Image (cartoon, rainbow, N blue to C red):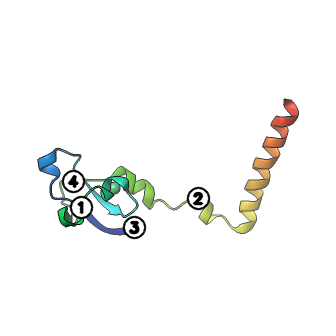
């Protein structure tokens, strides 16, 4: 889930990648103890790539129920076709 931007105030000391995070599901962000977090983006830092990924909406959530069924049917069809070839 997306959250307010934060970064580790210890990043400079431990030499870890200086990025800011904004997703609480980010494993890298989770490694930063709450007491070591500074809020904000610190303009010199890059946005964490993992957080960028996590912030992307999952494609299937945007498909309507009908479209999802079509995708599923296509997958089943291709699996069946592969089995016939075997
Ligand atoms: Zn992150």
Q: CA distance from mark 3 to mark 4?
A: 18 Å
* Residue at mark 4: C-beta within 8 A of ligand 1: no
Report crowding for label 2: few under 14, some 14 to 19, many 20 or more residues within 10 A (C-alpha).
Answer: few
Q: Position of residue 10 (x, y in %)?
A: 15, 54
- Of label 2 and label 1, which has the lower sequence position? 1
Q: Residues within 10 Å of mark 4 (few under 14, many from 20)?
A: few
Secondary structure at badge 1 equals loop
CB atoms of marks 1 and 3 within 8 Å: no
Q: CA distance from mark 4 to mark 1?
A: 18 Å
- Left or right, 80 with reference to 65: right
Numbered tag placed on residue 59 in the rendering = 2
Disc with the residue nearer the chain's start (2 vs 4): 4
Dot 2 falls on a residue whose secondary structure is: helix
- First along the sequence among labels 2 and 3: 3
Q: Quadrant of the C terminus?
A: top right
Residue drawn at (43%, 61%) of the image: 55
**Residue at position x 69%, y 67% in the image:** 64
Q: Earlier in the sequence, mark 4 or mark 1?
A: 1
Work out whether mark 1 precedes mark 3 in sequence or the reverse, and give the earlier one: 3
Classify mark 3: residues with Cα within 10 Å, few (<14), some (14-19) or many (20+). some
Q: Which mark is residue 2?
A: 3
């Amino acid at each position: 889930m997306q959250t307010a931007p934060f970064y580790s105030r210890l990043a400079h000391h431990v030499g870890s990648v200086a990025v800011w995070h904004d997703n609480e599901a980010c494993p890298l962000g989770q490694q930063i103890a709450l007491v070591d977090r500074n809020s904000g983006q610190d303009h010199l830092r890059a946005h964490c790539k993992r957080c960028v990924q996590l912030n992307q909406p999952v494609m299937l959530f945007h498909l309507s129920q009908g479209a999802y069924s079509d995708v599923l049917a296509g997958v089943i069809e291709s699996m069946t076709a592969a089995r016939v070839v075997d």
